[in-house]
Amino acid sequence: MRQIPVDTSTAMVMVAQPPAPKIANRQTGEVATDRETGATLMTVDVMFVMDGSAEILNLVVPSTGVSGELTMGTPVALTGVVARPWENEFNGQKRHGISFRAVAVTSLAAAKAA
């Protein structure tokens, strides 16, 4: 699958919605896991502000990459963000979009307090 690296070094990023387990199957409630490590996958919505424009991104992050207190409004650093284009067909309807994945989401609140 094609992955596009995302440069977040000049952006301001903060938590819009705290981490929650990523659900693989809504009917059974099965939680998604990383295929390589087996770690539980989490979703974190972040507000990504760059060049005067803000976007809400839904990131998928392994639970091992979530560190610090990540409550709404917490400034964070993102590590290893990639964008992945996707496309699927369901009941004859084609859908497409971009999903975002990060290696880690780290709270910057503790660093600011120190």
Image: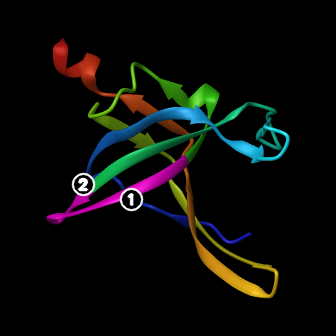
Question: Residue 109, percent across and down?
Answer: 26, 22
Q: Is residue 94 left or right of residue 112?
A: right
44, 78: nearer the viewer: 44
Q: Secondary structure beneath disc 2? A: loop
Which residues are the magenta region? 49-59
Q: Which mark is residue 10?
A: 2
Q: Is residue 82 above or below residue 105?
A: below
Report which quarter residue 22 is drawn in: top right
Give the tally of numbered discs.
2
Q: Where 33 falls versus 94 (above or below)? A: above
Residue identified by numbered label 1: 7
Asked if labels 2 and 1 touch by Cβ distance under 8 angstroms, the answer is: yes
Q: Say left or right for 52 vs 63.
A: left
Quadrant of the snapshot with the C terminus = top left
Q: Amino acid at mark 1?
A: Asp
- Where residue 65 is drawn, which disc sits there? none
Where residue 78 sits, quadrant-wise, is top left
Q: Residues within 10 Å of mark 2 (few under 14, many from 20)?
A: few
Q: Is residue 58 magenta?
A: yes
The amino acid on which the numbered mark 2 sits, given as a three-letter code, is Thr
Picture coordinates of residue 86 (x, y %)? 67, 73
What's the residue at 29%, 27% (across, down)?
Answer: 108
Task: Report the residue that reaches farthest toward the left.
Answer: 52
Query: In the rendering, at what x and y percent does residue 49 appear?
Result: 24, 56
